[in-house]
Amino acid sequence: MIKARRGAALTAALAAGALALTALAACGDGGESDPNELRLWHYEPPDSAMGVAWNQAIKEFERTHPGVKVKFEEKGFEQIQKTAPMVLNSKDAPDVMEYNKGNATAGLLSKQGLLEDMTAEVAKRGWDKLLAPNIQVTSKYDARGTMGGDKWFGVPNYAEYLQVYYNKDLFERHDVKVPTTYPELLAAMDAFVAKGVTPFANAGAEYMAQQFIYQLALDRANPAWVDAYQRYTTKASLTDPAWTYAATTFADWVKKGYVARSSVGSKAEDAGLAFMRGDYPMMFSGSWWFGRVAKTARFDWDTFVWPGSKLTLGSGGNLWVIPKGSKNKRLAYDFIDITMKKQIQNALGNAGGIPVAADPQAITDPRTKRLVENFATLSQNNALAYYPDWPVPAFYDKWVAAGQKIMNGSGSPASILGEVQRAYDDGVPK
């Protein structure tokens, strides 16, 4: 989603969006209002923690709303991400949908007037009492579409953060110590490389590479640095020592074989499946993989938070948003309310998600308990630093391209970061 700064690029982007919009609209009924139907869109796989919990929420909604049916339409993440502004400005908008949080996504739609202001209903239903202050940041936006504002435009019913998934069997087979500090992580990677094993799964064509880079920058950063980058509290430099260290170090990781140069064209699903097959000792990625790893991996595994850093990637989960054009807003609020109830929150936790309002005693699996406890610790320590592509619209693809250039050695880290800086400066609200 590189920002279009030229007329031809903008025309091409609109044409592509129009084609995608046609495809999305073809999946729906067309915009007639039906008071006995709630149209729901989300992009979580049915075997994910959110998919499991939200299917239960649909059943509970229909049980408590006799005569009303939920028309669920599964959409792809990229599908919604790239077409939401046009879809939500048409008669085909759903009543409630999952959408990504941050300035570049929910913030942009709120600024464009495409999302319902939920502030009064959030207070009425007490959702603000269930969500910790640093989780609320990504739910609230100001008039510029910057997160941390005064109006609620979305509500998350789960949370997320990045962690290292590791294959205990591979660590034991190769006699490598599980790291608890950053120097130990480097030592573990060196030990695996010496035995011909690539330590980390990676996906250069999607979010994984840029998240490595951001985490390495966070190792040299502090909360004020995060606020400058994410919320424009002061002018952010993407060529400062933290970013320079991150880009240079990631390039060095590729040279040393910590991540495979051949993964430059891989997608996140490729990397996740490869880890779950047992091809790699480690995968640094989101808690959204937890449920799938638990169900799919046929080896002994566990997780640890990124060692040695006071900051890591994470936030409240994706948001339930209500399009301005929703025809059944009351039903939409009712559905969101059900996803916040303990019954659904407990189900989400036991399926491997991070609930925001569960009964801690209801989470029974030891690994899941640790997942939830680690998030609580990060949240309490103000250690959640969001994601690198959030600050400005059309930034995700810019970071994908930057990560691939660093992996390929296509330019110096300084020149590549300079390109990212220009895209960032172009996107910061004036």
Image: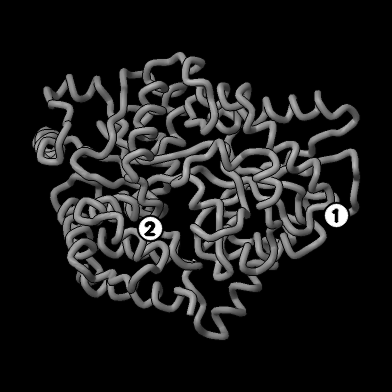
Q: Amino acid at mark 1?
A: Gly
| Residue 280 quadrant | top left
* Residue drawn at 63 percent across, 21 percent down: 343
* Residue drawn at 61 percent across, 39 percent down: 127
The percent coordinates of residue 111 (x first, y second) are: 61, 68
Q: Amino acid at mark 2?
A: Pro
Question: Closest to the observer: 194 or 40?
Answer: 40
| Residue 415 quadrant | bottom left
The percent coordinates of residue 170 (x first, y second) are: 22, 24
Q: Is residue 193 left or right of residue 212?
A: left
* CB atoms of marks 2 and 1 within 8 Å: no
Q: Which residue is mark 1?
A: 30
The percent coordinates of residue 109 (x first, y second) are: 62, 63
Q: Secondary structure at mark 2?
A: loop
Q: Is residue 403 left or right of residue 108?
A: left
Q: Which residue is mark 2?
A: 388
Tell me the crowding category of disc 2: few under 14, some 14 to 19, or many 20 or more residues within 10 angstroms, Cα based.
many
